[in-house]
């Protein structure tokens, strides 16, 4: 399955809608897309993963790399639309602290912009 990433810019936040499986075959593309946005100077990313049926450890590695790069540049990343299995995985591994999951794009956008919003818990 191929990976699709669409990007839209709204009020200083970049929303990336990701579709398809995120695995060893597709993570290089995802890494290039997301880190390219960071390299362009974008500091607030919301990743809509509602179209991601599967995300393996290489995908988690890319998401953590994006988190670190943004954190080091006073930015933030948040997820929205995560399936219950992904929410549970992030919670069990304690990665939910770095990759918080929100119920809506609006909540995630508010959170990466420094406002408070309620996270989804697993």
Image: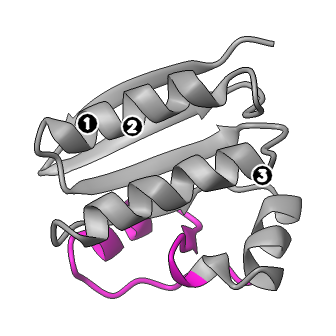
Residue 32 in view here: yes
Secondary structure under tag 2 reads helix
> What is the CA distance from the residue labelled 3 to the residue labelled 2?
17 Å
Give the answer, above or below, for where 111 lies relative to 15.
below
* Residue visible at 83% across and 37% down in the picture: 53
**Quick check: marks 2 and 1 in contact, CB under 8 Å?**
yes
The earlier-in-sequence mark between 3 and 2 is 2
Residue sitting at the far top: 2
Is 19 left or right of 109, judged from the image as shown? right
The earlier-in-sequence mark between 3 and 1 is 1
* Residue visible at 57% across and 32% down in the picture: 18
> What is the CA distance from the residue labelled 3 to the residue labelled 1?
22 Å
**On residue 34, which mark appears?**
2
The number of numbered badges drawn on the structure is 3
Give the answer, above or below, for where 113 lies relative to 4.
below
Q: Quadrant of residue 106?
A: bottom left
- Mark 3 vs mark 2, foreground winner is 3
Secondary structure under tag 1 reads helix
Is 54 left or right of 42, judged from the image as shown? right
**Are there few (<14), some (14-19), or many (20+) residues within 10 Å of tag 3?**
few
The magenta stretch is 97-122
The residue that mark 3 highlights is: 57
The residue that mark 1 highlights is: 37
Residue 113, image x, y percentages: 21, 70
* Residue visible at 33% across and 52% down in the picture: 45
Give the answer, above or below, for where 4 lies relative to 22.
above
Observer-nearest of 112 and 59: 59
**On residue 105, which mark appears?**
none
Residue sitting at the far right: 85
**Are there few (<14), some (14-19), or many (20+) residues within 10 Å of tag 2?**
many
Secondary structure under tag 3 reads helix
């Amino acid at each position: 399955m191929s990976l699709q990433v669409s990007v839209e810019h709204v009020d200083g936040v970049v929303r990336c809608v990701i579709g398809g499986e995120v695995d060893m075959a597709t993570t290089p593309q995802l890494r290039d897309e997301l880190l390219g946005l960071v390299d362009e100077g974008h500091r607030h990313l919301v990743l809509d993963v509602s179209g991601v049926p599967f995300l393996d450890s290489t995908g988690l590695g890319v998401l953590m790399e994006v988190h670190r790069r943004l954190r080091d540049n006073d930015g933030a990343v948040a997820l929205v639309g995560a399936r219950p299995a992904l929410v549970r995985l992030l919670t069990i591994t304690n990665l939910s602290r770095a990759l918080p999951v929100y119920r809506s794009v609006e909540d995630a956008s508010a959170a990466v912009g420094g406002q408070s919003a309620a996270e989804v818990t697993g």
